[in-house]
Image (cartoon, coloured by chain):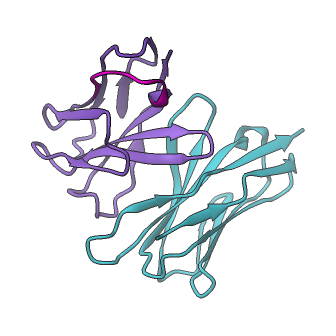
Amino acid sequence: NAGVTQTPKFQVLKTGQSMTLQCAQDMNHNSMYWYRQDPGMGLRLIYYSASEGTTDKGEVPNGYNVSRLNKREFSLRLESAAPSQTSVYFCASSAGTGYWENSPLHFGNGTRLTVT
Amino acid sequence: GEDVEQSLFLSVREGDSSVINCTYTDSSSTYLYWYKQEPGAGLQLLTYIFSNMDMKQDQRLTVLLNKKDKHLSLRIADTQTGDSAIYFCAERGNAGNNRKLIWGLGTSLAVNP
């Protein structure tokens, strides 16, 4: 079982470039999430989608946009990358419908992004 | 606001027990989770406990919850080198719409042969 698949695994961007991080899950989960992980800061929620067709801001949404393309796919776009966006990005999914439900999160293996 | 705290590092010898501790501030917590992150990988759910339980055991893992002190611990019996990883504690509150998931910063467990 693939679970949550993220692409690419690694990416280097120059300041001002744009890119889209892709995420797909094959568990028929309703909710999907984008987190960033930084040393000393832990996991911070960027955006989440409680169900197909809905998206909501998390703690650190500035500089990002998301699209819930269908039930399986949730993409994260950086329109104009900045060095502060250098991070490891994780996509996750959960079975329930909503950020406030209790089913555990299943994570992808992450995208390591460096912005120079 | 809500907070979850963990010590950052723990070092144990192979075969010993490891105990990773976590404290949280939200008295309305419903579920508390332990996740494991191996190098270069995402987070993997290890176990979780509902707030009306004191203890949960799953093979080598024992979770203890002291709701009065808002203290959660994860005990790994017979720790192996494959247990070397970062362990995250997370809690979900139950305060109306504010049931978001709050993460600790993670405890890095080093298992020495």
Image hue for chain A: purple
Image hue for chain B: cyan
Q: Residue A27, position in %: x, y?
A: 27, 40
- Residue at left 21%, top 42%? A28
Indicate the quadrant where residue A81 lies: top left
Q: Residue B46, position in %: x, y?
A: 55, 53
Q: Residue B12, position in %: x, y?
A: 86, 50
Which span of residues is magenta-colored?
A77-84
Q: Nearer the viewer, residue B85 or B7?
A: B7
- Residue at left 41%, top 60%? B101
Q: Is residue A18 visible?
A: yes
Residue most extreme to the bottom: B68
Locate the C terminus of chain B by quadrant: top right
Q: Is residue A51 left or right of residue B80?
A: left
A83 magenta-colored = yes
- Residue at left 13%, top 34%? A70
